[in-house]
Image (cartoon, rainbow, N blue to C red):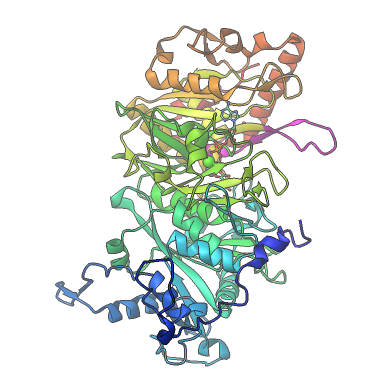
Amino acid sequence: MAENGEFSFTSRANKTGRDGLAKIQTNKKEAVVCHDDSAPPVKAQTIDELHSLQKKRSTPNTPIKSTLADGSFTSISEEERQKQQLQSISASLASLARETGPKVVKGDPEARKVESQKLTHTQYTPTILNISDSALKFTHVLYDLSPAELYEQAIKYEKGSFITATGALATLSGAKTGRSPRDKRVVKDETTENELWWGKGSPNIEMDEQTFLVNRERAVDYLNSLDKVFVNDQFLNWDPEHRIKVRIVSARAYHSLFMHNMCIRPTPEELEDFGTPDFTIYNAGLFPCNRYTHYMTSSTSIDINLARKEMVILGTQYAGEMKKGLFSLMHYLMPKRQILSLHSGCNMGKDGDVALFFGLSGTGKTTLSTDHNRYLIGDDEHCWSENGVSNIEGGCYAKCIDLSREKEPDIWNAIKFGTVLENVVFDEHTRQVDYSDKSVTENTRAAYPIEYIPNAKIPCVGPHPKNVILLACDAFGVLPPVSKLSLAQTMYHFISGYTALVAGTEDGVKEPQATFSACFGAAFIMLHPTKYAAMLAERMQKHGATGWLVNTGWSGGRYESGSRIKLAYTRRIIDAIHSGTLLEANYTTTEVFGLDIPTGIEGVPSEILDPENTWSDKNAYKETLLKLGGLFKKNFEGFMSHKIGEDNKLTEEILAAGPVF
Ligand SMILES: Nc1ncnc2c1ncn2[C@@H]1O[C@H](COP(=O)(O)OP(=O)(O)OP(=O)(O)O)[C@@H](O)[C@H]1O
Ligand SMILES: O=C([O-])CC(=O)C(=O)O
Ligand SMILES: [Ca+2]
Ligand SMILES: [Mn+2]
């Protein structure tokens, strides 16, 4: 690896056509020479002409409509439509201080080099108050490019972009290979001060409007200083009544392709009628924030301004920031409409039975919602409204570490042309990915459109959930592989949001690290956790959903003596939940956590169902169990004074549903 953190594949990558192609010298008069190919000659006089034939122009879209003052529709010319679109993009990229937008022109600056002299740019020139050099410069916009075009852009201009053996686009996200929650700021104004969750435990770090504008200007100036920017206009939420229009302005083809895959892709007709976006992201990627700016504590800042409907990203190229930034937005907008937003996966059986999968990062939402025998509604972000469930996204974001074809065939097969593969390591020659390699990061990821999963349910909506499955990866090895929960227990564990991972291995000390993250996604919620919990309780009660706690972590002892529960067993457990057989099983109740555990499940060794059986040292088991119980209690102290729902009854039940000892 080179010192800049990027891979260098010296010889191979640089051999191709750097010097451009030489002009063919054709000589018509000498065409009598006998050639062994009998095909008609190519209809081009020069190589450039030949290349221009290769790219077929897309068939024009259906007639473009625009609304007249009297409400009737009229067709507008392609030229006029382009002009309107460019005006909208120019307005998006406008400097607020100078009150002027950049001169925006569509297309790749490289492709236009030759023609540029004769080209008349369709430009937007607003009333210019102050002219500066930046206002005289053109910014080329690569608008809603196709995956193929984005591949070309990435490979040509973004170091670290390669096509893997199965056709995916391998990329590097730079210095950041995960989100930066401590750099996520939200503008506190008169409205958000009262509406949002602030203070201890809240993910919303405050910033003021002025500072937001400073960062926004920095991002916009950076983007406008580039030769070209990428713009995606897309949707969030498959529920047509509550669809949100988002625009993403970014500096990298990687980011544009990532969002193309992760958000809902508009049809050409929908794109024509797109209009003004409801929310805009300015992703300046590697360009840092100014550390002398008020509130800045590092070179990274991810800033949300709900009033302005904008988000600015400075100093990180990790694409997950965009995805999860929009999720935060939905966690604000949806509850305002009485819709519950959830960090969960979701799938549906042949009979229409829907299951939600909650859990923190790496606990199995994507793995377990991607089930060959069920329809995938979504792997990570959903809404639960009066009408049922809907996916917020149009793609999946799967963890790839140790991915295997046998255990996760549908995810494996989704890693093909169009898929973004982040931070993986592959063979220099064959471009075969080594999924076990953690050299860049353990958080290797694949982002693919949901249709890449063969049994995806399109549109990604479904009826009210029947089962609510809470996933925890318990590295202490004391939580049972599955427990049936009462409503109060479901709320207790939902608010706790527990998981535990094994800490870093560098110094040989492997102590499980318990993490509690309210609503299994505290990093993304905007309101107090009890607001979401109350909505979940109300919906589960109304629709008769059953809660389950599934430990996808350790069994047979702690991390050092035990091992992670086999994925095959977890899948059998989940099957028994879906089929309804687990609801009918016999149960016993555990000590301390008071969890109801089944005595038998088809395809799962009965002895593992009660974790106590799997520990050879019973004292160590009890000690570890009490230790974890203590951590739960301590974490829940912060929620003791909050009421959940209309009456105090549920609140009291929830408080009593935690560990007792
Ligand atoms: N018993 C098990 N159950 C579920 N997953 C398991 C199990 N054993 C190992 N795994 C592995 O754990 C990982 C679960 O990650 P997954 O992508 O499903 O996380 P996620 O909950 O979707 O997280 P994120 O919100 O970060 O996307 C996968 O790599 C999977 O192969
Ligand atoms: O957002 C990410 O980087 C990955 C993810 O899904 C999560 O952490 O929940
Ligand atoms: Ca996931
Ligand atoms: Mn997630």
| Residue 208 in sight here | no
Above-or-below relation of 382 to 31? above
Q: Position of residue 296 (x, y in %)?
A: 68, 64
211 or 617: nearer the viewer: 617
Occupied quadrant, residue 558: top right
How many marks the image carries: the answer is 0
What residue sits 32% from the left and 47% below the top?
Answer: 239
Q: Position of residue 355 (x, y in %)?
A: 40, 30
Q: Does the magenta-highlighted stretch encompass residue 513?
A: yes
Q: Position of residue 552 (x, y in %)?
A: 58, 26
Above-or-below relation of 362 to 559? below
Q: Does the magenta-highlighted stretch encompass residue 59?
A: no
Q: What segment is highlighted magenta in the picture?
A: 501-519
For the C terminus, the quadrant is top right
Q: Position of residue 645 (x, y in %)?
A: 42, 34
What residue sits 59% from the left and 59% below the top?
Answer: 185
Occupied quadrant, residue 84: bottom left
| Residue 419 in sight here | yes
Above-or-below relation of 224 to 636? below
Ligand 1 is in which quadrant of the figure?
A: top right
312 or 634: nearer the viewer: 312
